[in-house]
Image (cartoon, grey):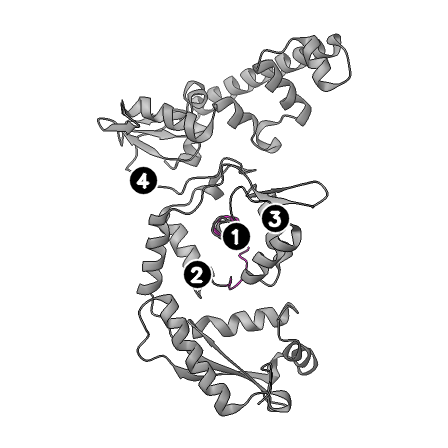
Amino acid sequence: MEYSELFWKVPLKELKQGYSYQDSTEQYICLVCGKAFEKGIIYKAGETLYEAEKYAALHLAQEHGSMFDYLIGLNKKLTGLSDLQKNLLRMFYEGYSDNEIVKQLDGGSASTIRNHRFALREKEKQAKLFLAIMELLEQKNGKPRTHEKSSPKKQLVPVHRTATIRDERYAVTEEEYQSIVLSYFKEGLDGPLSLFPKKEKRKIVVLSHLINRFEPGRRYTEKEVNAVLEEAFVDYVTLRRYLIEYGFMDREEDGSAYWVKEGVPVVTVERRSELLQAYKNMKRIAGVYAVKNQENGKILVGSSVNLDAIWNRIQFELDMKGHRNKQLQRDWKEFGNEAFAFEVLEEVKEPKAGQEELMKQLAAMEASWIEKLKPFEEKGYNEGSR
């Protein structure tokens, strides 16, 4: 059972404590991020040694804070609580008196707060009744609520605690994460996005990868955010909106500042190394290419670490009216996409080791072809003239 499913299936006691013990794997699973702690293993924190359950509780407190704060911070669609109700519950939890809450809210009266307390108690009673009804229904259908034994599951990628929605879309294994990143960032970890996926799970992986291009703790202007995202994708406005919507970023109401939300995990050195190794193992063809306008003969010469991916990206950017080469963009609009052809001018036969060395190798090859073809002014779309 994946931990995102486990989150909804565990008994209330385990949901409150924030972790669940799985008999089948003999592990304590964090219900917030899915991290597992194996029974019988001793874990060390500082100078103190902990058995697995104690360490699971310590992990929860250190990485995610109190379970109360985590649960109440979930999206309204999940909790059914309004912002006012959430604020009141936080103050009740912290021990504020009714009169103190009135002062905090800067209005109302103690009797109004008592009415809110009564309404929340009624909501609690309704929740208990509904839970009992659902348990009776499942028992009648022969589906006990207790989770069944299952085979060990693969480690899941931790979910950032600021995620605005929590469901199966966030249940991503390390293998899935790697596969999605390789599929959508075809030109390297720090390269452009080939396209923005439509499926929610893939969107989340792409966004969790992109957020690492921003420094935690730094405040960015909207222009700075746009500049970073435009390097990744022509439709940077969509990326910016989804980073906010899915809880990776926050901003001032007037848009004057943006920042990475606290609790968003940065990519680990281990994961980045694994991704880099996966890129090395992929069979990609690097080289120099030309985009040719068959109506007027003008060409654009460029190079890429992945010739199989670059033409799709160029076409996408041109279709989105976001390609940086304005001359090429104008002709694409005038003549249509069918007027253009893609040609590989030269492939890298023996690529240099390392991304930086390969880029230098490609730059030299590209410069040689530009010198040869002189794709400037009436002959081409490259900037400059010879």
Work out how far the residue at label 3 is from the one at label 2, CA to CA, in angstroms.
29 Å
Three-letter amino acid code at disc 1? Answer: Lys
User: Residue 184, position in %: x, y?
Assistant: 47, 60
The secondary element bearing badge 3 is classed as loop
Q: Which residue is mark 4?
A: 153
Give the mark nearest the N terminus, 2 or 1. 2
Three-letter amino acid code at disc 4? Answer: Lys
Q: Is residue 201 magenta?
A: yes
Q: Is residue 24 magenta?
A: no
Q: Which residue is mark 2?
A: 183
Give the quarter of the figure containing the N terminus.
top left
The secondary element bearing badge 4 is classed as loop
Vertical position of residue 266 compared to residue 88: above or below: below
Inspect this view and state whether residue 289 appears.
Answer: yes
Give the mark count: 4
Residue 199 tag number: 1
Vertical position of residue 356 compared to residue 270: above or below: below
Question: Which mark is in front, 3 or 1?
Answer: 3
Camera-nearest residue between 378 and 84:
378
Three-letter amino acid code at disc 3? Answer: Tyr
Inspect this view and state whether residue 286 appears.
Answer: no
Q: Residues within 10 Å of mark 4 (few under 14, many from 20)?
A: few
Give the mark nearest the N terminus, 4 or 1. 4
Q: Residue at x 47, y 19 (%)?
A: 136
Q: Which residues are magenta?
A: 192-206
